[in-house]
Amino acid sequence: MSSEATRLLTGKERRITVSPERKNPTVVVGMSGGVDSSTAAAVLLSRDYPVVGLTMQLWDQRRLAEVDPSLPQSAEGRCCSLNDVYDARRVAEQLDIPYYVVNFQKQFEKAVVQPFVSEYMEGRTPIPCTLCNNHVKFDQLLVTARQIGAELLATGHYARVEFDAARERYLLRRAVDETKDQSYFLFGLTQEQLSRTLFPLGSLRKQQVRQLATEHHLPVAGKPESQEICFVPGGDYTRFLEAYQREQGTPLSQIDGEITSTDGKVLGRHSGLHQFTVGQRKGLGLATGSPLYVLSLDTANRRVVVGEDRELLTETCLVRDCNWIAVEMPTAGLRVETKIRHQHTPAPATLYPEGDTVRVQFDVPQRAVTPGQAAVFYQDDLVIGGGWIMDRTD
Amino acid sequence: MKLYFDHNATTPVAPEVLEAMLPFLRAEYGNASSIHRFGQRARAAVEHARAQVAALIGCEAAEIVFTSGGTESDNLAIQGAVRASMLPRKHVITSAIEHPAVLTTCHAMERESNGVAVTYLPVDSQGRVDPEQVRRELRPETVLVTVMHANNEIGAVEPLAEIASIARQAGVLLHTDAVQSTGKIPVDVKRLGADLLSLSAHKFYGPKGIGALFIRKGLSLSPLFFGGHRMGEPRPGTENVASIAGLGAAAQLAAGNLETEARRLSALRDRMEKGILERVSDAGINGPATGMQGGEFLRVPNTSNLYFDYIEGESLVIALDLQGVACSTGAACSSGAIEPSHVLTAIGVPALRARGSLRLSLGRQNTEEEVKQLLEAIPAVVERLRALSPQVPDEKKAPAEKAVPARKG
């Protein structure tokens, strides 16, 4: 390899110092059949790591079609579709690495799908990717990786891990390619998990990744990417929730309710809280003069509370179940930039630990702080830690 | 290290078999149905193979129909017999541990609108059907009893002769899936009393994609496929001459050394099992532990199904493969299935234990030395899996590892 991309790979981000007499440790690469994880495997191979490819079978795309035949059974470029296993297998053949499919459907349903459904039912907006990272990829898959004789797990995530000898901590940093950075979804990784994790793409730009994929003749080099939730066919999560609940024998009933203003005035009706997200404007079915937005979801009274755009602004929020990466525990008054959803420009804020939770005080009020989403704290490109946004406290 | 212990999934093609096939992939390309001499030579090869297969299972050559393999043979036998029956209502008796080729065929027939009823007989902890239970389940509308000869996962051999005599008394047809017994233990259609018997070449050193169905003379089956039928043949289509020749050669090879090979493999298998169980705790045999009783096989000589508590069979198979040992969690066809094996469930193995089970199936080329290597590989791999398994109870755990190992050097 002689490209610019390759040159970048051999530089300082290589964290594991390998003495010449010792072979590199075996790495399992979690392969989704996409260009990123495929290239991650190729990159590690070119750096002389023994690589084993594993694809997780997480969800049966045909499963809910029996309940709702109109649900698309399999979309192109989704994880767990047969096409993706086929692609991952072809990449493994091309790279000549051992490759296996492991079945984690039960674990995935318990750790990701069920919480995803119940969060929506409780009026929150969940992030299944983070749950999958915390409880499936960097947990069950890592255990399997070590059981089959690997020491490390690599994925195609855009983020960087490094060991800071001074702090004696593994650090998580934003990817070099900020448009692709996925550190927001990785805030839950523990020191143990990070110590066994490699992100070979963290120092590369997407364009370089595609170039490397082409150089390695990977059959997925030109494959389009998917941004949707992998187990929700066609991206229609409302239909998914309804079909799943019906399949579980707990069909949604009595879920309709009122749409009200903050002062309790009834403005209309809705047919289920799970169809709404804080900050949402479309789909309210209200004819009013000024545009109205979902401010909060009141599960106890099955109410959608709406108001004007400016009412979405909050100065503070509470965050629970925090995981700290760069620090053991934050000190009161720690200055950070807080990212409250994936597509959010981190906002300057101050952290105040309060028992098991942390209060986030934004310098400037933030729009649509949404319960169920993650708040991830950064200092420049360093992930300090993060947690889950609790129901609005104001 | 390259060790192959998965002969119930498939076997290598024997050199003699390959030699028998090659002429028909080269100069002898005739269609066995053609009039000219190319065709005649192909026809001669097909008929020679038919006689070889018939000799292996003790029937007449005319009672052998070539198929694409075990799955097609099972489908043709079951669907063909049920559809050919004139009874207005039809009933089939089978067992809970059949191969999916039989089970899913039965499920599909049950779902059809003209209503075929199916009884799935339970088996005991050794995987055996109770012949008396077959008698109790017989109904006036029963058209077929289909019980496998030997089970693919645990190797259990069914009391087929007894089941057959009960079926015969009732005037009910008996089909047996003998895919896993043919070539491993004596298979004689007269001794077994079978009216229909399925076998597959690649389970006894023949090529994949070719099998046979024994159809007792005088029996008529509804065909699965339609095409250019010749007289009395329920399976149309141009004969796969090379593969048929391969099947014939494999049958002859199997008939030649059946007993010596069965004895050798039984002894090797028993030493392998004993060796593993001496070296690994919390492990044991699923299904029949004995090989023979009173001169009868209770288990095919090459098969061993073992459980290792606290681990996932799937990870065990991957870990062993990475060390060069090929084996399986159970049936190759259900790899990746999330449900525990229906066979292990049926013999009463708890779900968690079933998920930690491994099938080792021996074959012609396995040696004492290979078993020795296997005995070195398995304990270390099982130990590593258990060290990281969340299922291991605290009192059995090894001393805890360092919480965060430093990653240097």
Image (tube, rainbow, N blue to C red):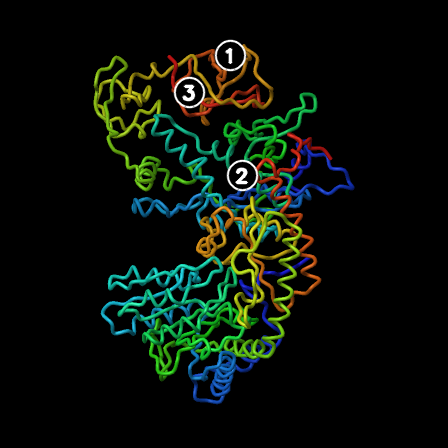
Residue A298, quarter of picture: top left
Viewer-proximal residue among B227 and B201? B201
Q: Which residue is mark 3?
A: A390
- Estimate the spatial distance between the alpha carbons at disc 2 and disc 3, rounded to whole Å: 27 Å
Q: Nearer the viewer, mark 2 or mark 3?
A: 2
What SS does tag 2 mark? helix
User: Label 1 to label 2, Cα distance in Å?
Assistant: 33 Å
Residue hosting label 2? A140
* Relative side of B250 to B2, left or right: left
Tell me whether circle 1 and circle 2 mark residues in contact (CB < 8 Å). no
Q: Looking at the figure, which quarter contains the N terminus of chain A?
A: top right
Identify whether B29 is placed above or below A39.
below
The reply to the same-chain question for discs 1 and 2 is yes
Q: Look at 49% across and 84% down and name the residue there.
A: B51
- Image quarter where the C terminus of chain A lies is top left
The residue mark sitting in front, 1 or 2, is 2
Frontmost residue, A86 versus B14: B14
* Callout 3: chain: A
Q: Is residue B134 above or below residue B408?
A: below
Query: Regarding mark 3 in the picture, which secondary structure is present there?
Result: loop
Residue B38 % position (x, y): 49, 86
Q: What chain is tagged by disc 1? A: A
Q: Give the CA separation, mark 1 to mark 3.
A: 15 Å
Q: Position of residue A268 (x, y in %)?
A: 21, 23
Give the chain of mark 2.
Answer: A
Can residue A150 be seen here? The reply is yes
